[in-house]
Amino acid sequence: MQAMESYSLERTVRVKTLELNGSLPTAELLVKTLGYHPHVMTEPDDSSSLLDYIIAHGRLREHAARKFARQIASALAFCHHRRIVHRNIKLENIILSPTGDARITDFGLSAVFDPQGHLSTYCGTSYFPAPEMIFQKPYVGPEIDVWGFGVVLYILVCGRVPFDAHGIDTLHAKIKGGSVEYPFHLSPVQKPPRSNAYHRLRVKGTII
């Protein structure tokens, strides 16, 4: 599980084939294509991250978090529609533009997925991996991003991670269990992360 703990692992987005507009573009062309979305940034820069924002401002009110949530959901839906799964959605990989808009960046662990197939590379970082990553079960792809997205949303409105522990084994056990405590200030429409991967396959319907 070394990849699970590696924050420094960086590589170019490696994609051999992707059917897009009837062509099979190279990885470089794919990166440029992803960059067309206003909430996707394929080239890292010096912009502050959502983690920096939360450290500076603390947890957000739900109406404020909803703006970021919709932008992240839009970016993920854009990628998933093109069969790209990010696989490392976390606060550090969501940067803020000069106008305060959220953008997903760092596609170093991304991959092309087949809706009828499965991926088997287990990656991510400590507090954000989906249960499939820890159990080392094959997965389609989008459900991994949706789990990370849910963890990000929890941190935005709660100001803390949903799963925490002193040791990595205990942390993984909590993630596998999927049991989350929700502060009293959250509205009734808030829902817990879904441990069942089938119910996490699509971003659509997760944001009101």
Image (cartoon, rainbow, N blue to C red):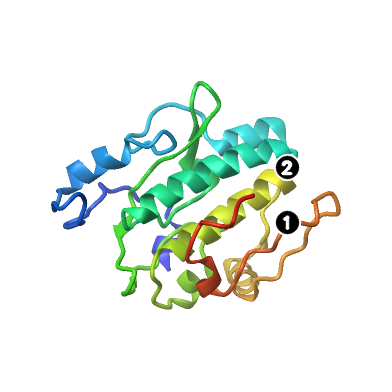
Camera-side residue: 32 or 123? 32
How far from the left and from the top, in percent, is residue 109?
Answer: 34, 54
Instruction: Give the total of numbered labels.
Output: 2
Going from N to C along the chain, the mark reached first, 1 or 2, is: 2
How far from the left and from the top, in percent, is residue 51?
Answer: 58, 39
How far from the left and from the top, in percent, is residue 111?
Answer: 30, 58
The secondary element bearing badge 2 is classed as helix
Q: Is residue 60 visible?
A: no
Residue carrying label 1 = 190
- In the rendered view, tell whether residue 175 sits above or below residue 128: below
Residue in the image at 54% along x and 61% along y? 147
- Callout 1–callout 2 Cβ contact below 8 Å: yes
Residue in the image at 63% along x and 64% along y? 193
How far from the left and from the top, in percent, is residue 92?
Answer: 50, 42
| Quarter containing the N terminus | bottom left
Residue in the image at 44% along x and 59% along y? 124
- In the rendered view, tell whether residue 98 sits above or below residue 165: above
The secondary element bearing badge 1 is classed as loop
Residue carrying label 2 = 62
The residues tagged by marks 1 and 2 sit, at their Cα atoms, a distance apart of: 10 Å
Lateral position of residue 90 relative to residue 119, left or right: right
**Three-letter residue code for mark 2:** Glu
Lateral position of residue 15 relative to residue 95, left or right: left
